[in-house]
Amino acid sequence: MAEPIRVLPEEARRKVASGSALLVCAYEDDEKCKRLYLEGAMFLTEFRSKLPVLLKDQEIIFYCA
């Protein structure tokens, strides 16, 4: 497996705002995601439910604090 590519917060924000990337809180626990929520992000549980319809080349940015 390849190493993850790190992006600066400003770049992540720009990509999410433009719709070119999804922002996903990487915690399993929804309560923890609520506490660490970033604007435009989705919870990991929501992301998993959308997996079947995501395009294979969709950029996804995971975050954790």
Image (cartoon, rainbow, N blue to C red):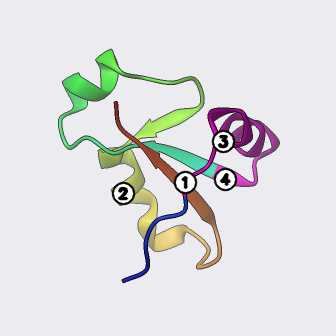
Whether 22 is drawn above or below 16: the answer is below
Labels 3 and 4 touching (C-beta < 8 A)? yes
Labels 2 and 3 touching (C-beta < 8 A)? no
Q: Nearer the viewer, mark 1 or mark 2?
A: 1
Distance from Cα at disc 1 to Cα at disc 2: 25 Å
Which residue corresponds to mark 1? Answer: 6
Image-quadrant location for residue 43: top left
Location of the N terminus by quadrant is: bottom left
Which residue corresponds to mark 2? Answer: 49
User: Element at badge 4?
Assistant: strand
- The answer to if 14 sits in the magenta stretch is yes
What main secondary structure does the magenta stretch of the protein show? helix
Q: How many marks?
A: 4
- Which mark is first along the chain, 1 or 3? 1
Q: Say which amino acid is labelled 3.
A: Ala
Query: Is residue 40 shown left or right of residue 29?
Result: right
x, y percentage for residue 12?
Answer: 66, 42
Which residue corresponds to mark 4? Answer: 21
Which residue corresponds to mark 3? Answer: 12
